[in-house]
Amino acid sequence: MGYRHLSIGEREVILKMQACRDSLRTIGAALGRDPGTISREVRRNMCNTGEYWPHPAQAASERRRAESKEPYRLEAEGRIRGHVRHQLKRYWSPEQISGRLRKDPGRVVSFGTIYSWVYRDWANGGTLWRYLRRRHRRCRGIGARSVGGRYPVVG
């Protein structure tokens, strides 16, 4: 089972159970969480008065999560983005653009990054996808071929 972040509902349960003077172990058992998770949550998000409030804790959690992610390479560097956009409009493939950029050591961008950027642009209503030569959809995963395709399932 993977890691799940606490939801606002779980944070409100923590507040209510703390008000009833329940222990961290009891709160953890009620939420199906480890007591250490509850302890860390309360300690990390305690306000100046020593109280725990769920809504500021949720906002702080979302802020920390957003700050931890690095910006996409092409969205962070305008010079490279402009070059890639210019070459796409000249109907260069992302593979060609990436190969040409590799010759300049400070401007290395993979073709996968370019495709991802074009698809994010498309999802936001952009038109860069029109400059892709084949205008193909995203690649299917490796496992997608074995289900219902012409390749037999072995095993």
Image: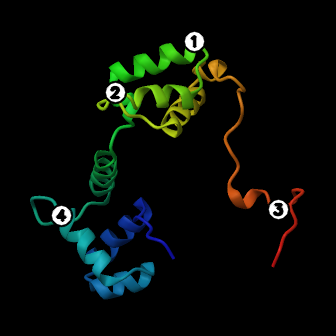
Determine whether 125 is above or below 73 in the image: above
Residue at screen point 35% across, 87% down: 26
First reached walking from the N terminus: tag 3 or tag 4: 4
The residue positioned farthest toward the left in the image shown: 48
Colour convention of the picture: rainbow
Q: Is residue 22 visible?
A: no
| Secondary structure category for the residue under label 3 | loop
First reached walking from the N terminus: tag 1 or tag 2: 1
| Secondary structure category for the residue under label 4 | loop
Which of label 2 and label 4 is nearer to you? 2
Percent x, y of residue 128: 58, 20
First reached walking from the N terminus: tag 3 or tag 1: 1
Residue at screen point 40% across, 59% down: 8
Q: Which residue has dot 4 on it? A: 46
User: Which three-letter amino acid code belongs to the residue tagged 1?
Assistant: Arg
Marks 3 and 1, Cα distance to the nearest angstrom?
38 Å
Q: Which residue has dot 2 on it? A: 104
Marks 1 and 2, Cα distance to the nearest angstrom?
20 Å
Percent x, y of residue 108: 37, 34
First reached walking from the N terminus: tag 4 or tag 1: 4
First reached walking from the N terminus: tag 2 or tag 4: 4
Q: Which residue has dot 3 on it? A: 147
**Which circle marks residue 90 in the picture?**
1
**Mark 3 Cα within 10 Å, few/some/many (few <14, many 20+)?**
few
User: Which three-letter amino acid code belongs to the residue tagged 2?
Assistant: Asp
